Image: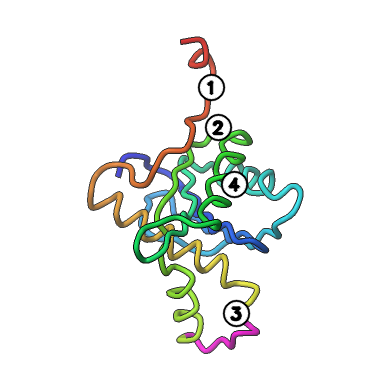
């Protein structure tokens, strides 16, 4: 894996944003928080990245099974762009097909009802997404996903 350290996984839904975090070795992703989708949501996610000293942020890109992108993918791309503007941590989009389905299955298997799962489904989906990105990056030995407008720091903007 190229970026050793804590990674953040983000599942940007229309109502809630799921947030997950990895351990510093990038082996395990765990759910952290569900952020309401409203004014200040990007700032809260950027604050979590800073609090956790994240070295990478992975934002889920919802594609259809055929790989095409619809309105939800556009919202994820827009959220990722806003996140790049709010933090100096690199942001990448990663295909999240079926992560919410997998998260719901995991929660049902743990004995949680749909009602009990409502508050944690988004952060669980973020953990499923992040775990997939960590595993893929580790097996490939390179970053995964699509970089989103690299943040400008220091003198880099002058080149």
Is residue 81 shown left or right of residue 135? right
Frontmost residue, 29 versus 146: 146
- The answer to whether residue 112 is magenta is yes
Q: CA distance from mark 4 to mark 2?
A: 15 Å
Q: Earlier in the sequence, mark 4 or mark 2?
A: 4
Tags 2 and 1 touching, CB below 8 Å: yes
* Real-space Cα separation, disc 1 to disc 3, in angstroms: 40 Å
Q: CA distance from mark 2 to mark 1?
A: 7 Å
Q: Nearer the viewer, residue 66 or 22?
A: 66
Tell me the element at label 1.
Answer: loop
**Which portion, as a residue range, is magenta?**
110-117
Q: Are marks 3 and 4 in contact (CB under 8 Å)?
A: no
Q: Say what secondary structure mark 4 lies in.
A: helix
State the residue at coordinates (43%, 65%): 128
Q: Which mark is residue 153?
A: 1
Position of residue 51 measured from the top left corner of the image (x, y, whole percent)? 61, 45
Q: Furthest residue to the left?
A: 140
Q: Which circle's residue, 2 or 3, is located before the other in the chain? A: 2
Spatial CA distance of label 2 from label 3 is 33 Å
Residue 88 shows which numbered tag?
A: 2
Which residue in the protein does label 3 denote? 117
Question: What's the residue at 55%, 32% (across, down)?
Answer: 88
Instruction: Name the quadrant of the N terminus.
Output: top left
Q: Earlier in the sequence, mark 4 or mark 1?
A: 4
The image position of residue 91, as x and y in percent, is 48, 41
Pair 4/1: label in front: 4
Which numbered disc flags the more N-terminal residue, 2 or 1? 2
143 lies above or below 32 = above
Residue placed under numbered mark 4 in the picture: 79
Give the secondary structure at mark 3.
helix
């Amino acid at each position: 894996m190229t970026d050793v350290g804590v990674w953040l996984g983000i599942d940007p839904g229309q109502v809630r944003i799921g947030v997950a975090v990895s351990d510093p070795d990038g082996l395990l992703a765990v759910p952290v928080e569900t952020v309401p989708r409203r004014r200040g949501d990007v700032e809260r996610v950027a604050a979590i990245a800073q609090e956790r000293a994240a070295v990478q942020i992975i934002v889920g890109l919802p594609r259809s099974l055929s790989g095409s992108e619809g309105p939800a993918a556009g919202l994820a791309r827009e959220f990722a762009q806003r996140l790049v503007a709010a933090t100096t941590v690199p942001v990448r989009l990663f295909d999240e097909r079926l992560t919410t389905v997998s998260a719901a299955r995991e929660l049902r298997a743990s004995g949680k009802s749909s009602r009990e799962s409502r508050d944690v489904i988004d952060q669980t989906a973020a953990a499923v997404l992040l775990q997939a990105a960590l595993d893929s990056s580790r097996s490939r030995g390179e970053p995964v996903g699509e970089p989103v407008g690299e943040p400008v720091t220091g003198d880099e903007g002058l080149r």
